Amino acid sequence: MSKLVCKGVSKKYKDKLAVKNVDLTLESGKIYGLIGRNGAGKSTLLSLMSAQAPLTAGSVEIDGEPVWENQKSLNRICFSRELNVSGNNGIAGMKIKDYLKMAALYYPAWDAELAARLVDAFEIDIKKQIMKANKGMLSAVTITIALASKAEFTFLDEPVAGLDVIAREYFYKELLSEFSESGRCFVISTHIIEEAANVFEDVIILRNGEIIANENTQELIDRCKYVSGLEEAVNKATSGVETHHAEMIGRAKTVAAILRGGEHIEENEDVTVKPMSLQNIFVALCGEEVQQ
């Protein structure tokens, strides 16, 4: 099993620490969801793990080999992100077909047959210049490169942002098909949480540049509950339990309870306990500070 390991990874831009002392291990054969609010450090972390930006502190290695300035490791990584079509950056004026040819040269394991099939399925006009393509087509190009790269560690930053619901469903289908066939490691950063939740085996939640949750998605969902009832009953039921996102309507109170080793809240005539979705959990954890 191949592993990408981050140890004490930090990135500082001027006076802002965008990523703070992150320890993280990614394993082949898993699909990870990377979620967080805008500015939480998701894109920065992906850039650091793929050596597209230098570290301020820490290290990133694949199977003991450094990623930074090491082509052997870089050949095993693909970070496919939204294409920059502004200004004269050398890419904006390029035709999509030429951009795909460039990708084929860059990634040693490039699958030309898969790329051609995705181009047809997404109806990508490869003769169009990148700067003249709409957001949906640009998203389809980034997905095509990510999947066809065959890179062992493949990172996708907001891959479905420009796609309609039919194209998004096709992407998830192709992602799972490629994952099942290859056992690659995928990390998907997205704001469309509920739609992608079933795809994520593990979920990583970033808040202000720090990882606040990193675990199996279903296990996280299973231990997070909404607890509702009269304020006094809810406070009693959740005493000593980590709670977030309290809401009051008159004397009634609802909180998100995060249960840890052995903790349990019993539903009774005074307290209602309901399950939470991954999106509910994200809002609870990132919407406000912890309450005790």
Image (cartoon, rainbow, N blue to C red):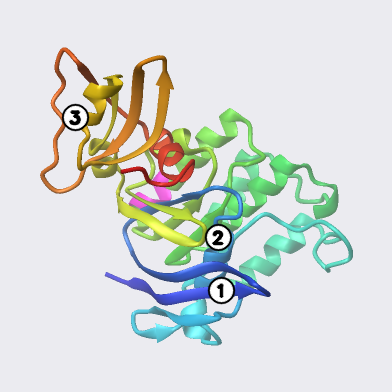
Q: How many marks?
A: 3
Q: Which residue is mark 1?
A: 11
Which of pointers 3 and 2 lies earlier in the amino acid sequence? Answer: 2
Counting from the top left corner in percent of width and height, residue 38 is at: 60, 49
Circle 3: residue type: Ala
Q: Residue 158, image x and y in percent?
A: 58, 48
Check contact, mark 3 vs mark 2: CB within 8 A: no
Q: Nearer the viewer, residue 215 or 274?
A: 274
What is the secondary structure assignment of the residue under circle 1? strand
Highlighted magenta segment, given as a residue range: 176-180
Residue depicted at x 76% and y 58%: 84
Q: Residues within 10 Å of mark 2 (few under 14, many from 20)?
A: many
Q: Given contact means CB atoms under 8 Å apart, are the residues at marks 3 and 1 in contact?
A: no
Question: Do the residues under discs 2 and 1 have CB atoms within 8 angstroms?
Answer: yes
The residue at which mark 2 appears reads as: 41
Using the rendered view, name the quadrant where residue 47 is placed.
bottom right
Which residue has dot 3 on it?
237
Task: Point out the image quarter for the C terminus.
Answer: top left
Earlier-in-chain disc, 3 versus 1: 1
Q: In this rendering, does residue 207 appear at all?
A: yes
Is label 3 or label 2 in front? Answer: 3
Q: CA distance from mark 3 to mark 2?
A: 35 Å
Structural crowding at the residue carrying mark 1, measured as other residues with C-alpha within 10 Å and reported as few (<14), some (14–19) or many (≥20): many
